Amino acid sequence: MVRDLDKTLETIGTSYIDLFVIHAVDRIECLDDQIRKVAERLKRGGKIRYFGFTTHSNMEQCLAGAAKLGWIDGIVTTYNYRLMHRNAMEQAVKSCAKAGIGLVAIKSQAAMAHPTATVGVETDTSLALAHRFMAKGFTLHQAKLKAIWENPLISSTFSMMPNTTILMANAAAAMDRTALSSGDMALLKTYANETLSCYCSGCAGICESVAPNHIPIAKVMRYLMYYHSYNDYEKARSCYHRLPIGIRQGIAGADYSIAELECPNRLAIGDLLRRASHELA
Ligand code: SF4
C-alpha cells in the first residue's frame, strides 16, 4: 500500500491525496488491524486525508461492516436505481451515514451482463420512461444519475465518461436541478424489477458459496458487463485472462444449477458463464 501510494504521489506530482482507497473489497475482514495501522500512519504523516475502499461485490455487507469499524472515512460502492430499493442496501447506507462515512456511487447506470444489454432491454416500462423523461428534457441515462443524487446520503457519483458527449450529458444532468418525481422513481423501480434477470447485483456471497471449484461468478458477470454493456472488449478479455488458468478451464463445463436456484435475480448463470468462456477466452 505504502509503495503504491508513494508511486502515485510521484506520478501525479503532489504531496498528498484526499481519499486513498483499497480497490475491490468484497469482505470486510480484509480490512484488518494491520491495514488500520497503515492507514492511520499515512494520515498522521500527511500523505492522505481520508482512507477507505471501493466495493462492487457483497456491497451491503461491506458497507454495514465498515460502519462498525470506526476508522473508515469513505467508500466507493456500486449503487444505482436497482440496488437502492433493497432493504439491506438502504440500511447499510444509513449505517454508513450515521458513522460519518462518505459514500460515492459507481455503476450508476446498472449496466447488464446479459447479451441483450448491447441493444437494451425494451419493455413497455422502458418506453414509458424514455417518453416521460424526454418530455421533462432529459434522457433515461441522466435520470439514472438523478435517481442517485436524490439520496442525500450519497455524497457523489463516479461516472465513466469515455467521450465528450457523455461528459456533456452528465454535466447537464448535474446542473439541471429538476428533481425526479415519486412517479418517476416508481417507474424506474418497475423497470428494474422487469429486467432483474439480466442484472447481476454483485451478491457474490450467495452464488459463489455454492459454486463449483470456487468459480468467481460475480467477477465473470462483471466482465460480461464490460463486454456487452460497455462494449469494452479489450478490458473484458484482459480481466478474464487474469483469472487463474485452472479456473478458466473449469468455467464452461461446471454445473451451476444450485447457484441458479440461489440467485435472487434468477440469472441464467450457466448460460452466461458458458458464453463468457467462449466470448472472453
Ligand atoms: S449471479 Fe446472482 S447470486 Fe451471483 S452475484 Fe449475480 S445476482 Fe448475485
Image (tube, rainbow, N blue to C red):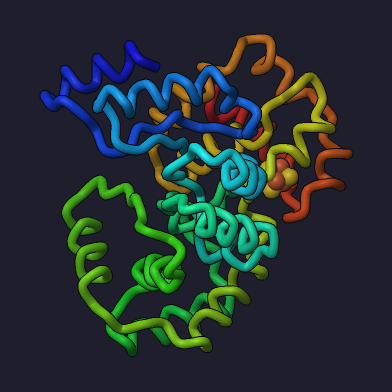
The spot of residue 132 in percent (x, y) is 42, 86
Considering the image in quadrants, where does the C terminus appear? top right
Residue 175 against residue 104 in the figure, above or below? below
Q: Please report the residue visible at 30 percent of the width from the left and 78 percent of the height from the top.
A: 138
Residue 270 against residue 111 in the figure, above or below? above
Give 171 or 89, whichever is nearer the viewer: 89
Give 213 or 253, whichever is nearer the viewer: 213
To which quarter of the image does residue 137 belong? bottom left
The spot of residue 7 in percent (x, y) is 24, 15
The number of discs equals 0
Q: Image check: 92 left or right of 158?
A: right
Image-quarter location of ligand 1? top right
To which quarter of the image does residue 154 belong? bottom left
Q: Image check: 71 left or right of 6?
A: right
Q: Image check: 173 left or right of 213?
A: left
Give 251 or 172, whichever is nearer the viewer: 172
Q: Please report the residue visible at 41 percent of the width from the left and 26 percent of the height from the top.
A: 40
The spot of residue 206 in percent (x, y) is 77, 41
Considering the image in quadrants, where does the N terminus appear? top left
Q: Determine the residue located farthest toward the front in the rendered image.
A: 44
Q: Image check: 272 left or right of 107?
A: right
Q: Please report the residue visible at 52 percent of the width from the left and 66 percent of the height from the top.
A: 81
The spot of residue 191 in percent (x, y) is 59, 72
Q: Please report the residue visible at 32 percent of the width from the left and 47 percent of the height from the top.
A: 160
